[in-house]
Amino acid sequence: MSEDRDNKTIWDWMRLSWSPDFTQIKFLGRALGIFAQILALLLAFIPLGLLVAFGAAVYAAVGAGTGVTGEAIRNIGLAVAAAFGAPFIVWRSFVAQR
């Protein structure tokens, strides 16, 4: 039973009986690469945008001319910490899996 389970591929799991021929769709590799790079850039800009929002909220609160509360600053700070900490959590899970 375990031998049969070890030889399974993702195509078997999806119940596909054919193997794809990647030499026929070379453009797909380039398209997926460009998509992955754009996605990585967008994911990199999210923490930076949160950091700018945090700085603006702190600046507005210090200016005392606005209604920004400490709760809003704390929530933005928690979002910044989560955005910058998420890659480390993923890295730690990969290291722990080995």
Image (cartoon, grey):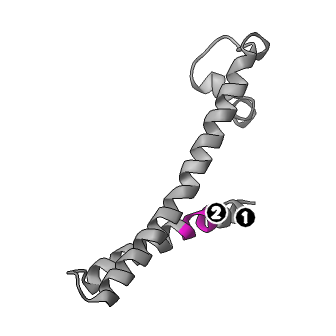
In the picture, measured across the screen, residue 45 lies left or right of residue 19, that is: left
Magenta part of the chain: 84-90
Q: Quadrant of the N terminus?
A: top right
Q: Quadrant of the C terminus?
A: bottom right
Q: Confirm whether residue 5 shows in the render.
A: yes
In the rendering, at what x and y percent does residue 22 appear?
A: 75, 17
* Up/down of 30 relative to 74, above or below: above
The residue singled out by tag 2 in the image is 93
**Amino acid identity at mark 2:** Ser
**Circles 1 and 2 in contact, beta carbons < 8 Å:** yes
Residue at 65% of width from left, 30% of height from top? 32
The residue singled out by tag 1 in the image is 95
Residue placed most toward the observer, 56 or 50: 56
In the picture, measured across the screen, residue 19 lies left or right of residue 13, that is: right
> Residue 33 is drawn in which quadrant?
top right
In the rendering, at what x and y percent does residue 81 appear?
A: 49, 74
Q: Secondary structure at mark 1?
A: helix
In the picture, measured across the screen, residue 67 lies left or right of residue 35, that is: left
Q: Is 86 colored magenta in this rendering? A: yes
Q: Main secondary structure of the magenta part?
A: helix
**Amino acid identity at mark 1:** Val
> Residue 50 is drawn in which quadrant?
bottom left
In the rendering, at what x and y percent does residue 42 appear?
A: 54, 49
* Up/down of 9 relative to 40, above or below: above
Residue placed most toward the observer, 53 or 43: 53
Residue placed most toward the observer, 75 or 89: 75
* Up/down of 6 relative to 72, above or below: above
